[in-house]
Image (cartoon, coloured by chain):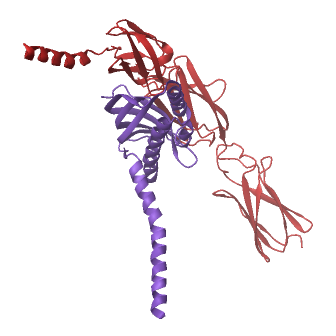
Chain colours: A purple, B red
Amino acid sequence: MKTKAIMRRALLAVSAAVVISVPASFVTVHADDSLPKVSLNADNLGPRSIEELTSKVVARDYAFAWQTMAEALEQNRPDLLDGYFTGIAKQDLAQMIADQTKTGVRVRYVDHGHKLDALFYSPAGDAMQLRDHADLEINVMDGQKVIHSEQVNLQYTVLMTPGADRWLVRDLEVAPEAKP
Amino acid sequence: MRLFVSTLLFWIAAVVPSLAAEVHPPSQVLAGAAFSMPSSGAGQGTLYLIGSAHLSKRQVNLGTDIEVDGDDVQHAGRYTVILCTDQCSASEFYVHPAGPDRLSLLVHPSRVPVSNPNAISAVAVVWDVYHNLEISPETVKFTVNPDEHTSLSEARTTNNGIAWIRLTSAAKSGVVKLQASVGKVSEIRVVQQVASDACNLRIHASSESKKIVIETDPVRDCSGNFVPDGTVVSFTMTDSAGETTVDVPIKRGVAKVEMPAHGHARITAASGVVTGNELNLAGGGE
């Protein structure tokens, strides 16, 4: 009788541990798998110096921005841009999605990672400019047919501004010095 | 002979796809400027023009110059042109900003204490008419107008479209206009310069029945500016009943409080990090 009770308790404990641990590990794996790799170099940043936490948050939010941009373009869903884009960047991408919807053509990004160089952090901390060396595969699809595919290293000029609880991409432009 | 024909057919099959229609855009274009690009081939093809914020698809006649409207290239950056017949061929070009035409000016803070070194920062971001970041170096002139008759200017060259400056607030409180301009474009922001912390806080007291009325002299900062109404002055009275502290906001330049009197009392006042003179009252109103 006593042995059965111990067994039952042990079983309950193991079940509880499985229930608790499985979702946590799933979320972690999912996040690692889906987010593009972003590294941030702030060695030459000025005039304001960046705190370690801010540099982590900027890199994380820029990764989320690319993830949501790729999803928004893939699914023609401008609402996905609300999370990490604002101002002219959001407006431009919404226009791109409208053009995709109108023509039936889609641009699909396969993201192989970003190396960010922080260039400017305003004295008041209300704007940050970065240069992104992006490693991308770009596929252009007309309907279900891939009409163009290329591997590119593009150089983006990025302007980010802080929002309530995250950094938002305000401007995202490919710099002409990019080497395709 | 049969081998020769087979080889020839093989080479034709291999070479023909490489002769797919092509389009040759210029390597760089100015934003919003129409241009044409020669194409090879014959018949009709489908042209795709894809930028970071623009995507279009249309039928074109091959072997002619293909016209691209200025509206299709308003956004700066990389564009891919894809021309499809049986096969697709792609080429790319860059659109450059059309020249400075807009200015974003970030000034911080909107209220600042007087005589504060490097307390005001101004950041100017230069854009073209289509809101492309103007990355070529431009001279931005920052001008401060402390009053109607005075104007101070300082020029800064943009780096990747951004120029910035730090300013020390003036000794006199009031509104200061900060202007940034590039070419014919300018933006103005207003900064309210307010008095700094109180300086030489002085109090005096008078007895009224069983109360003591304590009042400050007009509260000014070290430059002589009136400290804004609403700034809190803390009065502390220590007497036989113990210690009592009352926080009073400044109204019309002075802070005033009434406190009950219980024999001998010691009264002090403080505002922020500044403490005032000490009063020792004997007997009070009892």
Relative to B271, B9 lies left or right: left
On the image, the x and y values in percent for residue A142 come to 43, 27
Relative to B251, A37 lies left or right: left
- Residue occupying the far right of the picture: B209
Residue B17 location, quadrant: top left
Q: Is residue B199 above or below residue B58?
A: below
Relative to the observer, which residue lies in front, A167 or B152? A167
How many numbered callouts?
Answer: 0
Residue B208 location, quadrant: bottom right
Q: Is residue B20 visible?
A: yes
- Residue occupying the far top of the picture: B64
- Residue at 37% in and 46% down: A37
Relative to B170, A121 lies left or right: left
Q: Is residue B248 above or below residue B50?
A: below
On the image, the x and y values in percent for residue A179 come to 30, 28
On the image, the x and y values in percent for residue B284 come to 85, 70
- Residue at 48% in and 69% down: A19
- Residue occupying the far front of the picture: B2
Q: Is residue B98 visible?
A: no
Residue B91 location, quadrant: top left
Q: Is residue B23 above or below residue B55?
A: above
On the image, the x and y values in percent for residue B193 come to 65, 39
- Residue at 65% in and 43% down: B223
Relative to the observer, which residue lies in front, B207 or A80? A80
Relative to the observer, which residue lies in front, A34 or B124? A34
Relative to B230, B69 lies left or right: left
